[in-house]
Image (cartoon, rainbow, N blue to C red):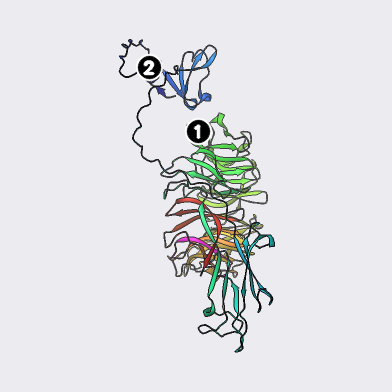
Amino acid sequence: MKRIEALLLCSLLVFSSLSGCIGSDESDEQTNPQEEEPTELFKWTTYYAVDLSSLPACNTDSIGLLYYVADINAFQTCQTIGWNLIDITGTNGLDGVNGSNGIDGVNGQNGQNGTDGVDGISTLVHTNPESAGSICTEGGIRLDIGADNDRDGTLSQVEITTTSYICHGQSSQSGAMPQLITTQSTPSLAECSEGGSIISTGLDDGTGAGIAMNGILEENEISQSTTICQNLIFSPVKEFGFGSDDGIHPSSRVIQENGFLYFTVGGTSTQSSRSIWRTDGTTNGTSFVVGGLSIGNCKKIGDLLFYGKYALSSTNLLHVYNLSSNQEIVLKEASGGIQLQSSWHGTLGNLFVFYGLESFNSDTLFVSDGTDSGTLSISDIQPQPAQDYVVLGNMLYFVGIESGAYELYKTDGTSAGATQVSNINPSGNANVRSLSVIGNEIWFSADDGTNGQELWKTDGTTAGTSMVSNINNAGSDSNPVGMVLFNGKIYFSATHSTTGNELWVSDGTSSGTSLVKDIYPGNYPNNSDPFSLVVINGSLFFGADDGVSGYELWSSDGTSSGTILHHEFGLGMYGGYIREINELNGKICLLVESFETGYELHCEQVITTFDFN
């Protein structure tokens, strides 16, 4: 407990007792009575407590002690009947004469941005042919205009507010007059990334190089066009930093669970402490969960959050937070807790799997169900600290270190421990990494000591573990990472001597493994470095650098021509930097480092614009 100088309390008591004099209504011209000599005050040692729960037990050891309690801004003293509140407030004095107005202060900082408004209602225009009649003698076009109030993309009869007619001219004795033609076309994806329409009108009069009255509205005959465009934008769910300062640490990772993304904020130069937040992709749906973390990542299993936090004079002690009861506990607190030895973890059913250290024992592999009795050490095999774990069937697979070599291991989460799947490199380090579950197999990269770091897969058995393809057969490593299933094939990034690190695809055979596109043309060091591959709404998304736009958001349909720059966060090489891509309720959410906002979590929005020409 921090001590507060007793003199501060004494000053407060004296100030309180003089409050009646300060508030006098008497004229300044009256003579004030001579002040009495103040009674001598003795120092009373005062202690500090954050809240009432922090007060010690009131007993013979604490009788007479005085505590300042911060959260209630008051003093408590221990008496024979327990802790009692000390009221140091004197009686109110009479109101004094109002003083003259002070000089205007400096304007305060701008407040936070208000809540985003509700999306506006689209205006729709429907065109229909108008038969010859009383309105248009020679026929024409009827324009129905109105607001799409029910947001279903169609203009119903009750939504029509205005109807206009464009009538064809009457034929003269010299022949027919050119007709007014309206056409509808689709803009390019470069103009409208999410689609749209171009509505054009004009007389079929042969203007420019056109052919008059051929029933086709040619480019030079267009007198007016309207482009209705839907474009994709990304904006931070909440700006956790200030301006270009980072709000989220680049090493933070995002987990998706039940319609929310969970992520950690802080750990930056401007915010040293870390906290867990969650979002549904909107500003209003972004909220604080728990704070005080000492390590950047967490895992969620049901209503439980597992993470590392400073406690009991140790860093990274394993904590569990119950989202239903809002209760936080230190696991194995009675024995000093368990230190998390890595920010990479796994889950197996309802078990949290992690690499930890308990008391003065060796680092081991643990599982926990969120209770002390259900937190157990299951294997002495040390997991590779910078690799996630994956689950295939009822087994958890991880990269283990034994005799300095990284090989693939599996466990059922019981005290039976962990076993090696296959000794891929009997004479050295297999350097297994980038585990990805694809159907009934795990795809990964490994070095067998002969072919270098190449593409492998396993069904969990020694016999079912084999190399898929020696991609960079020039003797160097291809280092495949980020394997993901898309349209029945496996997509990933890999390095080849003639193309550098680019997007590749495999059907599971060596002959069916090939380059998709050389996004950053040229051989090494011209690398586009595809990263964080994820499938969202039938498209493959990833971050890549084409050497012109910087590290931006790309998408692919699996073909070279269909692999395109999807969204650019800023012009040029340094506009934005994609760190991680996630799917949330059908939307794309990204951890992005940009010049304007620093490192923040952005989620997509689709906006509609109208361009009249």
Q: Is residue 559 above or below residue 534?
A: below
* Amino acid residing under circle 2: Cys
Q: Determine the residue positioned at 48% across, 34% down.
A: 314
Residue 550 within the magenta-colored segment of the rendering: yes
Mark number, residue 518: none
Distance of mark 1 from mark 2, alpha carbons?
A: 50 Å
Q: Is residue 321 above or below residue 46?
A: below
Give SS at disc 1.
strand
> Which residue is tagged 1?
311
Give SS at disc 2.
helix
The one of 5 and 27 positioned closer to us in this rendering: 27
Horizontal and vertical percent position of residue 518:
50, 69
* Amino acid residing under circle 1: Ala
Is residue 480 visible from the viewing direction of this image?
no
* Label 2 packing within 10 angstroms: few (<14), some (14-19), many (20+): some
The one of 369 and 18 positioned closer to us in this rendering: 18
Mark number, residue 21: 2
Q: How many marks?
A: 2
Specify the segment rendered in magenta: 547-559
Horizontal and vertical percent position of residue 258:
63, 47
The one of 252 and 567 positioned closer to us in this rendering: 567
Horizontal and vertical percent position of residue 156:
68, 62
Quadrant for the N terminus in the image? top left
Q: Quadrant of residue 98?
A: top left
